[in-house]
């Protein structure tokens, strides 16, 4: 089932080792403990051990970590014969991307005497950037080799860091949960990549591009973990105190409202009034995406629920009506429907964030304005202009994502990366030793078949 | 396989949208950030960011959240063809119940100038109330439509809040981990509902009311998560400091002792000395239920282990001997055996709580008495009377649960809610699009069958 | 399929009940709340509630708890027909071992007026000791009865506590993440046990000693949880502040580098350039093991990545080349390959720890030296001698593990414990009621077969 082109014996080791060795060298040259992880620096000052940011953020970090590795990884196991690749390639590219993101984000977020300082906050940011790559992975799922995915990650992480720098530092936008930086960017980048990699004959693998009963249950593990920990995701790097607290709560209610909308819309639109697992697995999460920008603002639970409710409706409608159009008319083969889960809800989140920022008042935020909108608090800009900044940020993100995806898509077309042929997409056995081909299984399967054969013949 | 009555195309969207829109409106009118989530309020006072309750309780909240969505959801996937519904309906009714519980509990727990104030503690309480509904779901699992479940949740959440108010506020009982409020209430409510919904011809679906190999492994995911995070559950809303610490530890040892008792009893009672997955999946958790009331008290690890040990024994005996009697004599069809996991251990926990409260002394508790038994510390009541309060609370809970379940059971009998017929219980495909019926699968299955057929014929 | 010798009807209940009753009695006599869990003691002093160690360590504890019960339990579900036993026996022996470890470690770590004081730190230590037993379980997986496993746990926990006491108290070594105390000890103990229990005719069960598609996915749940939470594991009992922060971060980067090395080596060495699930499931974790000793030191992210990179390479090479040799030449049947995941990486971690300790300078650690190397900070020993201590500790651990495993192996050979025969190893149905043998399934399977038969015949 494997021909020379897709054989990974040399390609994958070469890229893994080269990348890891480069990373190690760059970490050796550039990276240092920050003043909260360095033994000497931390003990140079008098403070409570609790002042260490570790205690504010590490539980959130671990929740985000679970979302990245279990959440994204298992969400994509819905395909019947692509579970090893879904979890396994997710694991590989995430392990690479978080290291590379540490460097890229450290470079753009400001270096200290030529050194990148790292701690729990940079770890969360690295995981966030990784999430963006994994969203793009969802768009090309089943149609790419691990080498292609690593190459995509190299470029996407870099562009992510540039875009994040423009938004948060240059434009002064707020986007704690990454509706723009993570979701919109990752989705439209991935959609453009999959557009460039368009396979007119993908229907040759159509019979594998669907789920089986247990693969859908595995995918629900991913869904539920993403759903549960999204409040931690959105609040992981907001300011301490009320900000983290409020963001988590807003996201919690947005997701709950989104879930009811999803079930309602799924029964309404799906075949014969039956619920569709694709909707439940994905659209129920749109409320977390859509609360990514405004979650830290004084959105109120009421506002959060409206946002989540709309996100769920939009997302199901996207799966039902828009995805087929994107595939047929625009030739965008979006395996996981990231446009519906991350793309449109991300744009919705960005818009909600812009509006919520524009209507912020001193009366509502009090002294808390400094945490949420420091430039508004300092009088540097009006709240309405903060809204404009947010809107510009969305436009920049879309532009960066689409342009970046275009270029990277063409790079990934190089034949050297070992992409699977059209006939063997969505199939683990092209890159994995899959049980059932081993000797010990052969024995057993023979036994079973013989038994069945006897029963059938008797 | 679906007839008009069970078709959800209109019923489910209507109830989802109506409920969610009502929730949004009520949240808009009634709900506000509390002073730890509100930007202005929090910044109005001088305090360390760490004083924000978020840091005391959010890790516990997330553990509880995992128990509600993964724990309960996957515990019920043991049925061979009901995994989508187990996880999926669990997800739906939990997402609804936590919103509705926020309102109901906020209403009864005291409003502030006509407003309900919410934060991480109310989120935990909402999840707790949701847990009670999910316990009742376990009793009726496989025999109800999602619309019935939502209707049940509407009423059960309301009654839960009333009962909780009576116990904790009016009677001054202590029940941090909810042996009474959550487990006893949820179990007996659900048992009464399933009694009223008795199906004499349920054996027509008997062949689906059992597990397969991998469905039992999925269920173990639920079991293990419930088991691991039960210490967080019982300690999530106790007083800060020693109370949270002690409660978590008591529960940890209670569960460990319960597990050994469960394995021993399972081998002793089950067929041919073999372990029964039903016992392991359920009875091993009874130690957490039984430590729900006394866990925050000075129960000692020694006392906790005795309680857990007894709970495990009772629970296995219940599955082995009592459940068949309940079904045959009392016509209680308790799919998950919630009587054995939540009912009897909950009552045991309530009794242990009453006794432990009655013997509390200043000598043992010191100034910590204020946290655990404030009325005893203030001299308002004697410890022995606190024990009486606890016992009365158990009786009230049982009465509320049975009466509530009776009424709600009859409401759920209305034919409009789309309950499945006796012949198609414990079956996903009545409410879900199940893979294997799709075209792409049909293709593939045909291929496989053809191959097999060729092999068999050759 | 079960004969009298392996029947657990009396053996398992007897050992479970006797052990649990002994534990309860010993806890009643010996165990007390420590001053942070005791109501009176905690309230005797004035302090912030946050000073309670619960808030520093409970989130880490829960992560460790997940590793023990989900991580180890599901990692071993890769076998096609041993999932119930993998998760279920893991659950049983962990529930026993954590109680017994509380006593043994409490005894050796110093008693207070004849009493063992317990709190969240002792809970983490008990889970750590349990982890060591579960590593040994991995070596004998599929070839032992639950009674044998409990007997093994009794002795191994005891020896673990002795070895830990010698290392940490007598020798003054540092080993926060347990490269030596947990991984090296558990691995070589288990390898020696499985050597003594060598089965020359194990190939009679060879057809069951391999995975199927979905069992490999279940195993990936274990892998990913271990991978994600290893930073919490290594940092769970380090000093507060920078130490916990630094240890978590070092482990995070060690694991990431290890993962790329694993994928590269797997494709390089495995059949036809395809990735091997055995490598991914196991070798990718070696970076956590290898960072267990030096993780709390000023290893730097650079150093951590080198360690992880080497650990991944060594581990894959071990699976590919060393394991077959160990089995054929040394008659060590290591089911899970714990030598490759815990043995060699543990030794590597110990060596890295010794070297890192030996080169520690005041210049690098500043006042933080007191946390990491208190004896060096106090001037009692030179850093180089601390390195020698570490190296001696490794030798002691290897000796204790091999000698202990030898003795315990012979004890486990007693025929009374009900070990499975060679022909029925790696098989759940010998100790579990497995679905598919029940009446209700028989019915259904008949139906399905009849349908298929009809289709094939038509």
Image (tube, coloured by chain):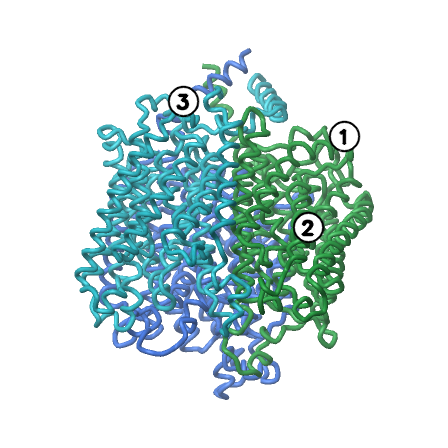
Chain colours: A blue, B green, C cyan
Q: Position of residue B182 (x, y in %)?
A: 67, 53
Q: Residue A64 or B265: which is nearer the viewer? A: B265
Q: Quadrant of the C terminus of chain C?
A: top right
Give the chain letter at badge 1.
B
Is the C-beta separation of discs 3 and 1 under 8 Å?
A: no
Which mark's residue is nearer the viewer, 1 or 2? 2
Query: Quadrant location of residue C427?
Result: top left
Q: Residue C170 or B259: which is nearer the viewer? A: C170
Question: Would you say C437 lies left or right of C126 here?
Answer: right
- Residue at image point 66% right, 39% down: B337
Asked which secondary structure carries label 1, the reply is loop
Q: Residue C105 or C330: which is nearer the viewer? A: C105
Q: Which mark is residue C421?
A: 3
For disc 1, the marked residue is: B201
Seen in the picture, residue A437 relative to C240 is either above or below; the reply is above
Seen in the picture, residue B313 relative to A139 is either above or below; the reply is above
Q: Residue furthest bottom?
A: A379
Which mark's residue is nearer the viewer, 3 or 1? 3
For disc 2, the marked residue is: B351
Q: Position of residue C453 (x, y in %)?
A: 57, 19
Give the chain letter at badge 3.
C
Q: Residue B440: in sight, yes or no?
A: no
Which mark's residue is nearer the viewer, 2 or 3? 2
Q: Residue B318: in sight, yes or no?
A: yes
How far apart in space, not on screen, are marks 3 and 1 (Cα)? Answer: 44 Å
- Residue at image point 22% right, 47% down: C395
Is the C-beta separation of discs 1 and 2 under 8 Å?
A: no
Q: Residue A39 or A258: which is nearer the viewer? A: A39
């Amino acid at each position: 089932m494997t021909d020379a082109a897709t054989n990974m014996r040399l390609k994958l080791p070469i890229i893994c080792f080269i990348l890891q060795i480069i990373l190690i060298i760059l970490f050796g040259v550039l990276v240092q403990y920050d003043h909260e992880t360095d033994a000497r620096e931390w003990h140079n000052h008098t403070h409570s051990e609790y002042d260490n940011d570790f205690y504010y953020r590490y539980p959130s970090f671990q929740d985000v970590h679970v979302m990245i590795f279990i959440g994204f990884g298992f969400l994509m196991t819905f395909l019947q014969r692509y579970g090893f690749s879904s979890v396994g390639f997710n694991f590989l590219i995430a392990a690479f991307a978080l290291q590379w993101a540490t460097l890229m984000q450290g470079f753009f977020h400001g270096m200290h005497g030529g050194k990148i300082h790292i701690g729990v906050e940079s770890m969360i940011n690295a995981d966030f950037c990784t999430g963006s790559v994994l969203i793009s992975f969802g768009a090309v799922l089943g149609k790419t080799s691990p080498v292609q995915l690593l190459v995509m990650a190299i470029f996407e992480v870099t562009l992510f860091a540039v875009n994040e720098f423009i938004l948060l530092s240059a434009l002064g936008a707020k986007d704690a949960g990454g509706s723009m930086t993570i979701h919109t960017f990752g989705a439209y980048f991935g959609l453009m990549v999959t557009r460039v990699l368009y396979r007119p004959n993908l229907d040759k693998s159509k019979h594998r591009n669907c789920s089986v009963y247990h693969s859908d249950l595995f995918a629900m593990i991913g869904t539920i973990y993403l759903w549960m920990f999204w409040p931690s995701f959105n609040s992981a790097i907001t300011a301490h105190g009320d900000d983290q607290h409020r963001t988590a709560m807003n996201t919690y209610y947005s997701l709950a409202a989104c879930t009811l909308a999803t079930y309602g819309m799924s029964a309404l639109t799906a075949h014969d009034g039956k619920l569709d697992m694709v909707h439940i697995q994905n659209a129920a999460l749109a409320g977390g995406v859509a609360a990514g920008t405004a979650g830290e603002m004084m959105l109120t639970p009421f506002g959060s629920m409206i946002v989540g409710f709309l996100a769920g409706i939009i997302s199901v409608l996207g799966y039902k009506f828009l995805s087929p159009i994107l595939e047929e008319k625009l030739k965008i083969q979006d395996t996981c429907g990231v446009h519906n889960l991350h793309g449109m809800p991300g744009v919705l989140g960005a818009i909600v964030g812009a509006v919520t920022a524009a209507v912020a008042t001193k009366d509502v935020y009090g002294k808390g304005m400094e945490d949420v909108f420091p430039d508004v608090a300092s009088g540097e800009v009006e709240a309405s202009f903060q809204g404009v900044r947010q809107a510009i940020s969305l436009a920049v993100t879309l532009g960066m994502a689409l342009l970046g995806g275009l270029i990277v898509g063409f790079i990934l077309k190089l034949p050297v990366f070992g992409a699977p042929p059209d006939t063997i997409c969505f199939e683990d056995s092209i890159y994995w030793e899959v049980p059932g081909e081993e000797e010990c299984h052969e024995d057993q399967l023979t036994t079973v078949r013989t038994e069945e054969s006897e029963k059938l013949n008797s």
